[in-house]
Image (cartoon, coloured by chain):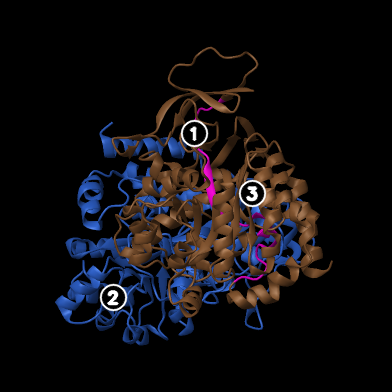
Chain colours: A brown, B blue
């Protein structure tokens, strides 16, 4: 498949003298799953190409949601403004026990559709029903890094989980990648964490774990091991010979940051979830100053309650400023970088995150013809501080067009919404 | 004009046993500028009525942006991530000196168009060029409470400002109301503040002022008067015989709150601006507990950078939780109430803020047919935690339809965007 996009603004996210290159006018040629040309001319291309008129639009790399639980989108709004334990016990656990494969697919489809509609082209997930999620993501055409969540209760399934991860990685033309998902320092024993880290090294599977999300977690780990969760993971071998994706990192001491600096890992900052659940504000500016990779995630739709990465980008930029009482902290380009370049690193996607010849064709087109994008002082600032997911007009992943003029091409949106409503009614209200 | 809207969900914002009544199915009849019927039947109505099929939509009262500087939308993205003084000196003041009446109208039109498109039906403004703003708002059909900003430099204009306020209040079928706008405790002397408060009492004009926004302001007032800004305003007579709209209130001591409790005033919380400018997080939960009216505002597009009140609602709800480390603080209904009932009180609009017979027909229709509104567990939660301004399909103010199917009916969006771009180019880049 060849696609040509003409006459648009391009924010390539390439760096030039240490800064992101400003948007420039040009054309984009996509051949197969790759970008083959970007610039103001246009080489010859197959007559069978799909042509897109990009006038009034801006192309940028797709956004990467580096921590979510897609299937839980079924529970959006099913218990807000509650204490965590009461929400889990009264709302979530009783329903999760009833989930079928079909229910999981309904939730996954809703999440994938919403992510595509708001400009996300890749996501990292931790939950159950991994085969179902992989199938839905592959059919939808989005990139997914899938990890089965593992706690002490499910350690007996570790061999199956490793089998899934080894079998599925690289499937669906490379759209699907996998990780191992030890749930959290407080739900996995030291022995479990050590075993999972060892399996990760042996099978070359990265680790996706929740880390230092709440004060309660800090207290539990301190009481159990007299150390911090980050120190515990280091002791279990997470940062030597393993790649790690560490979700949250709200509470990291200076010693923790020393531990994490220079390692092959990424912290995934989930600003909205951390605010909504009253967890805290992660010290993102300090992590970035130390050169730690920071990506952004929505967490599940239960603690957000949408999957719109543009909201995360803006929220990450503005809460960092109030945390340090300094309006110059995390400027727009840095916030956007976390959601793109940071996300690509967190997911281990080497040929994603910049628009240039040779990279995978994962890109989105933003409709600039909106009141909130005027005047055109600074498009990058507008993308960070004024944009929403609804401003995304077109989404292309791996060379395949998944959305055009806000219409999904690989998924049936109406059917997905109806199915999600039907599933939620049965699960939550026995209707 | 008679308008009938059939077969939709209605969130009236009426209270029932202390809580907001859940959305119910019904029809709405609008005659002239008022709602004449809401319910599951429908009385006879004129055959000349405009009929709207509300299937798949939810009606709710329009949102009220209780603190903004509309004309400054011209400067959106013109200097982000900067220190306040450096931004004012390098970016804003040099341009403001060059603003013409036509420029002001271009900025006002951009802001009013953006507000209508994101579901705002009334706003409170403080700036210059009040006649121009009134004209644009009246032509656009939106409600505006307009205050000329006054500082010591412009006290000689107080008589003209009072004249404007008395002449324009109630104009344009009541769409336009007015206030006096003493800029801030640190830009107006004690004498100026006292004079303006006296003028407010004499001419029955409410006061719109910035209060306790930054630590710098707290230090200046402490040094100058050995008291807090709230105490200063009390000493200048702001809270006796005056109605006041106090923007920000980020730094309020217990004694300040005692001063403000039980008075005829509203605090306008601007959560996104307070985060982006690194001002701080206002103690909103405490104010609400004391029964102080709290409304929400976007502040100007320079410190936001859009005018989407749905973002303010969500941000207000989630930052209050992290401030108190308590996820149950400011639940969804309370956050929504600030943007509607709180806003109506702040602007002194007695017949706005609920959908019921006899109230002004100021309402918006939300298109529920979106992935981020599924499953339909709790529509009120979705409006607070998942919605965006782009979900607004239809806007009606004072019985007049201003937007249908996202098309503005009283303003030319394309022309407004072009004019804003042209104006900004001339002002900021001499092009």
Residue drawn at the location 48% of the way across and 16% of the way down? A42
Q: Nearer the viewer, mark 2 or mark 3?
A: 3
Find the distance from the CA under tag 2 to the CA under tag 1: 52 Å
The chain identifier of the residue carrying mark 1 reads A
Q: Quick one: quadrant of the N terminus of chain A?
A: top right
The reply to whether residue B401 is visible in this rendering is: no
Find the distance from the CA under tag 2 to the CA under tag 3: 51 Å
Q: Are marks 3 and 1 on the same chain?
A: yes
Q: Are marks 2 and 3 on the same chain?
A: no
Give, as a single range, the part of the protein colored magenta. Answer: A53-80
Q: Residues within 10 Å of mark 2 (few under 14, many from 20)?
A: many
The image quarter in which residue B217 lies: bottom left
Q: On residue B197, which mark appears?
A: 2
Q: Residue furthest right?
A: A431
Q: Residues within 10 Å of mark 1 (few under 14, many from 20)?
A: many
Q: Nearer the viewer, mark 2 or mark 1?
A: 1
- In the rendered structure, are the residues bearing label 2 and label 3 in contact, judged by CB atoms less than 8 Å apart? no
Depth order, front residue of B40/B383: B383
- Is residue A342 placed above or below A298 in the rendered structure? above
Where residue B88 sits in the image (x, y, percent)? 23, 53
Depth order, front residue of A292/A48: A292
The chain identifier of the residue carrying mark 3 reads A
Depth order, front residue of B408/A140: A140
Local secondary structure at mark 3: helix
The image quarter in which residue B250 lies: bottom left
- On the image, numbered disc 1 is attached to which residue? A59
């Amino acid at each position: 498949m060849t696609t040509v996009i003409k006459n648009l603004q391009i924010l390539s996210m390439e760096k030039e003298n240490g800064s992101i290159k400003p948007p420039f006018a040009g054309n984009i040629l996509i051949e197969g799953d790759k970008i083959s040309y970007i610039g103001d001319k246009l080489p010859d291309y197959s007559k069978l190409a799909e042509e897109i008129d990009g006038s009034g639009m801006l192309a940028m790399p797709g956004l990467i949601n580096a921590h979510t639980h897609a299937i839980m989108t079924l529970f959006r709004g099913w218990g807000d403004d509650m204490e965590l334990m009461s929400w889990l016990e009264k709302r979530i656990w009783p329903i999760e026990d009833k989930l079928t494969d079909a229910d999981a697919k309904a939730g996954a489809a809703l999440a994938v559709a919403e992510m595509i509609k708001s400009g996300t082209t890749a996501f990292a997930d931790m939950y159950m029903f991994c085969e179902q999620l992989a199938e839905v993501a592959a059919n939808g055409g989005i990139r997914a890094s899938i990890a089965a969540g593992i706690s002490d209760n499910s350690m007996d399934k570790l061999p199956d989980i490793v089998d899934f991860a080894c079998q599925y990685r690289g499937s669906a033309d490379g759209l699907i990648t996998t990780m191992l998902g030890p749930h959290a320092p407080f739900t996995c024993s030291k022995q479990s964490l050590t075993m999972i880290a060892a399996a990760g090294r042996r099978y070359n599977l990265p680790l996706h774990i929740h880390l230092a999300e709440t004060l309660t977690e800090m207290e539990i780990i301190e009481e159990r091991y007299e150390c911090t969760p980050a120190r515990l993971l280091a002791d279990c071998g997470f940062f030597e010979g393993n790649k790690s994706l560490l979700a949250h990192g709200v509470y990291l001491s200076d010693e923790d940051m020393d531990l994490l600096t220079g390692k092959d890992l990424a912290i995934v900052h989930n600003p909205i979830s951390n605010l909504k659940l009253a967890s805290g504000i992660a010290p993102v500016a300090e992590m970035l100053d130390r050169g730690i990779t920071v990506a952004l995630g929505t967490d599940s739709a239960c603690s957000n309650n949408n999957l719109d990465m543009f909201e995360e980008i803006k929220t990450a930029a503005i809460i960092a400023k109030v945390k340090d009482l300094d309006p110059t902290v995390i400027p727009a380009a840095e916030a956007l970088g976390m959601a793109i370049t940071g996300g690509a690193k967190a997911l281990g996607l080497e040929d994603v995150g910049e628009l240039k010849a040779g990279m995978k064709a994962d890109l989105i087109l933003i409709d600039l013809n909106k009141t909130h994008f005027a005047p055109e002082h600074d498009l990058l600032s507008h993308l960070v501080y004024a944009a929403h997911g609804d401003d995304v007009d077109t989404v292309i992943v791996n060379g395949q067009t998944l959305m055009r003029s806000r219409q999904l091409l690989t998924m049936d949106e109406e059917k997905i919404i109806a199915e999600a409503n039907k599933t939620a009614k049965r699960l939550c209200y026995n209707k």
